[in-house]
Image (tube, rainbow, N blue to C red):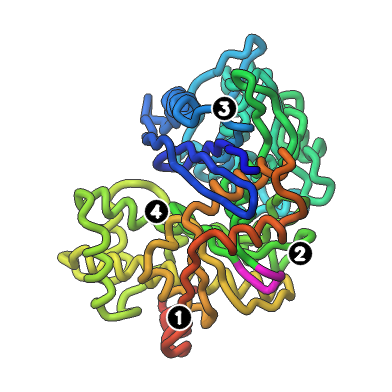
Amino acid sequence: MSKAFAAVDLGASSGRVVVGRLGDGRLDLDVVHRFPNEPVRVGGTLHWDILALYRGVVEGLRKAGPVSSIGIDSWAVDYGLVDATGALLGNPVHYRDARTDGVAARIGDLYEVNGLQTLPFNTVYQLVAARDTPQYAAARHLLLVPDLLAYWLTGEIGAEYTNASTTGLLDVRTRAWSAPLISELGLRADVLPPIRHPGEVIGHHAGTPVVAVGSHDTASAVVGVPAEGTDFAYISCGTWSLVGLELDGPVLGDASRRANFTNEGGVDGTIRYLRNVMGLWPLQECLREWGAPDLAQLLRAAAAEPGLAHVVDLDDPLFLAPGDMAGRLRKAAGLPADAGPPAVTRCILDSLALAQRRAVRQAAELSGREITKVHLVGGGALNELLCQLTADACGLPVLAGPVEATAIGNLLVQARAAGVLGGGLDAMRALVRETQRIVRYEPRGDDALWRAAAARAGR
């Protein structure tokens, strides 16, 4: 007997509510509502419009109709502050805001405690930047975005583990808030909620259980990877590319720290050992600047451009902020000032494939795990040129799909909590393999060309 579940999946540019029907060996998806996620700049600060997102969530749940439960996932690191009355103390600040510039360098190395990649927008750096503000002083609770939305739906306070593990305030070994680190940084431990784990019931919304899932969208996406065995790397590719492995424990030490790899919590006590790669953000920005041209036509034209002719280090902070992305890419890659969209697009995709190649190979080397294939999930799985370039760059088969891996992972955890599914990650992934379309790309080309291009890009 099948049951219906609602997955609220929020990305950096849009949100949606997906209804999944699971049972009797079936997994059927229906996207019932989509809504934009448009940041707002006020007084020089870039914010998320969290009230518009909440409105989209509620409207999507209304369209979903009766379901057995609800799960919420979103991007990581950003948070809202709530006062003692339950009121939100201002819209959450966007991770691309400049308020954290230079903070990480002032704090120094936290890797031995939190095991996280140093990224300028990590929650810990946002809090250090905000610790002297009136809002922080007045706060009673700090709630990451999916926890804030769950609070508004249920009235219950908590911090889901997979997302809490991205804050930089969690001890990677104990998997609990690190009181010594929090004290050392002059932050407040009293605003951090109790940790809850995927599968736990948070509370109820209009009588429907709201269930904790892998609320960091990458944690849910990794659940939805249709892998068999352990000899795989994954790439969750969208605005960001999250490239890594699923391990039983963290990989720490100087080599891992220097490589800037992160150890984030996964579902069922796993560790997502990965590196954030810039992903499709530069292409998304260029498409916006170019007036949203036909993407399929643009990719065909990009495929006809000379391969690896112009490459950049796509992880350079130069490409983090919005605005004049095409101009910055042309200058960094040595492209002519009048280079058109196909040439710029080929530069982006070649450079992204190089960055993904590096992360896959480093993850395997640092963890000692042999990798025989790469699973690429998320929106990037629809980009045939990127999938083929990634196979060529990595020298490994790329299995592309499902596109909806994040929503699927969200739904699978809910279904298991409801007793519709049994077993662990292997059982959940078997259902994904049996029900979802996966496209295989075999590597081709000369690895020496990729090595040379990587050297030119500083990779």
Find residue 77 and name its label: none
User: Which residue, given by chain and number where applicable, does mark 1 sit on?
Assistant: 392
Q: Position of residue 53 (x, y in %)?
A: 45, 29
User: Which residue, given by chain and number where applicable, does mark 2 sit on?
Assistant: 253
Q: Looking at the image, which is closer to me, 161 or 3?
A: 3
What SS does tag 2 mark?
loop
Q: Residue at x 71, y 41 (%)?
A: 198
User: Which residue, given by chain and number where applicable, does mark 4 sit on?
Assistant: 281
Please identify, in this view, whether the residue under mark 3 or under mark 2 is nearer the observer: 3
Q: Using the numbered discs, state the Cα–Cα distance from disc 1 to disc 4 in whole angstroms.
A: 22 Å
Q: Choose the circle earlier in sequence order: 3 or 4.
A: 3
Q: Choose the circle earlier in sequence order: 4 or 2.
A: 2
What SS does tag 1 mark?
helix
Q: Looking at the image, which is closer to me, 456 or 196?
A: 196
Quarter of the image with the N terminus is top right
Q: What type is the residue that disc 2 sits on?
A: Gly
The magenta span reads 228-233
Please identify, in this view, whether the residue under mark 1 or under mark 2 is nearer the observer: 1
Q: What type is the residue that disc 3 sits on?
A: Leu
Q: Using the numbered discs, state the Cα–Cα distance from disc 1 to disc 3 in whole angstroms.
A: 41 Å
Q: What type is the residue that disc 1 sits on?
A: Asp
Q: In the figure, is residue 237 to the left or right of 297?
A: right
Tag 4 and tag 2, C-beta contact below 8 Å: no
